[in-house]
Amino acid sequence: MRLIFAGTPPFAAQALGALADAGHDVALVLTQPDRPAGRGLKMLPSAVKQVALERGLALAQPTSLRDEQTRAELAAVGSEVMVVAAYGLLLPPAVLAVPARGCLNIHASLLPRWRGAAPVQRALLAGDAQTGVCIMQMDAGLDTGAVWARRTLAIGARETAGSLLARLGALGAQAIVETLATLDSLPAPQPQPAEGATYAAKIDKREAAVDFAAAAQQIDRQIRAFDPVPGAFCQWRGERLKLWQAQPESASAAVAQPGSVLTVDERGVAVACGEGVLWLQQVQRAGGQREDARQFARTQHLGEGARLESGVRA
């Protein structure tokens, strides 16, 4: 098919590469403008832009799709379908109507659960046992369109947002290629059920602040949901300390003041929580690199009786 592709992060880049490899005519790629990143705030291209440049595909980076000139340029492509994956810009009804067969979205959840911007992080925070991808016919609502195909994936016990997004990206790439290959013979897309709809709000960095008064199991979910960005954090000696790897240990009640270090051994640094114990295994000081929590404890004299402060400031 002759396609327009719209996407930005690595999750979308996997689909773009798969569509090109499958022989589709990707006539135009839309992605977000380059953004400053890193300590030097260097302007960096999106993962989708990198794939488009590597493959010599026509590329556009509009800041909005609402102006008439942009819509005219899209219409001039003469596309059959627009494939959208984590693009980050709103597609107004006039743009949804541009391709002859509309716009298909690769969404990283089992709709109608987790409609919205952060379905992977919300699934991890909620402790969901499974997730997946849906190929959805886009309409004017927020991820409310009828579903052409769905693929289910079990969430691993130690899954992070980064690892889960990578697996879902591969699954989504496979699903969109298979859907387009059989689109003419597929039954009509199935409307989403009204029951079970949940909203995956965009992540606010303040949500990454750890409160040790919470249960160890919930803090563990928080750490994994915010890895790699924005990174869950607490406070140590007035500085932000990011928590990257941990292991929760259940207990029926608090064993000490939340945030108190109980012990340091081969398992890591044991920290008391409002319920249970959290064994910290990998941490990162502000301006530093990720390091083993035991090494951090040795160099910072973080031993039994010391206390990590919650990232939540009063």
Image (cartoon, rainbow, N blue to C red):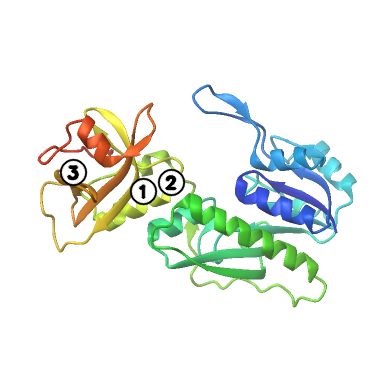
Q: Which residue is mark 1?
A: 223
Mark 3 Cα-neighbour bin, 10 Å: few <14, some 14–19, many ≥20 = many
| Residue 233, position as x, y percentages in the image | 32, 39
Residue of label 2: 227
Whether label 2 touches label 1, CB < 8 Å: yes
What type is the residue that disc 2 sits on?
A: Asp
Amino acid on which the number 1 mark rests in the picture? Ile
Residue at the image point whose x is 67% and y is 38% from the top:
32
| 137, above or below 231, in the image | below
Q: Is residue 259 left or right of residue 56?
A: left
Q: Which mark is residue 208?
A: none
Residue 212 visible in the current orientation = yes
Q: Is residue 288 above or below residue 71?
A: above
> Under tag 3, what secondary structure?
loop
Q: Secondary structure at mark 2?
A: loop
Q: Residues within 10 Å of mark 2 (few under 14, many from 20)?
A: many
For the point 30% across and 46% down, which residue is it? 281
Q: How far is disc 3 from disc 2 in space, using C-alphas? A: 21 Å
Which residue does the numbered mark 3 point to in the structure image? 259
Disc 3/disc 1 C-alpha distance (Å): 15 Å
Q: What type is the residue that disc 3 sits on?
A: Gly
User: Where in the figure is residue 94, as x and y percent of width and height?
Assistant: 77, 50
Report x, y in % for residue 66.
73, 40
Q: Are marks 3 and 1 in contact (CB under 8 Å)?
A: no
Quadrant into which the C terminus falls: top left
Inter-mark Cα distance, 2 to 1: 6 Å
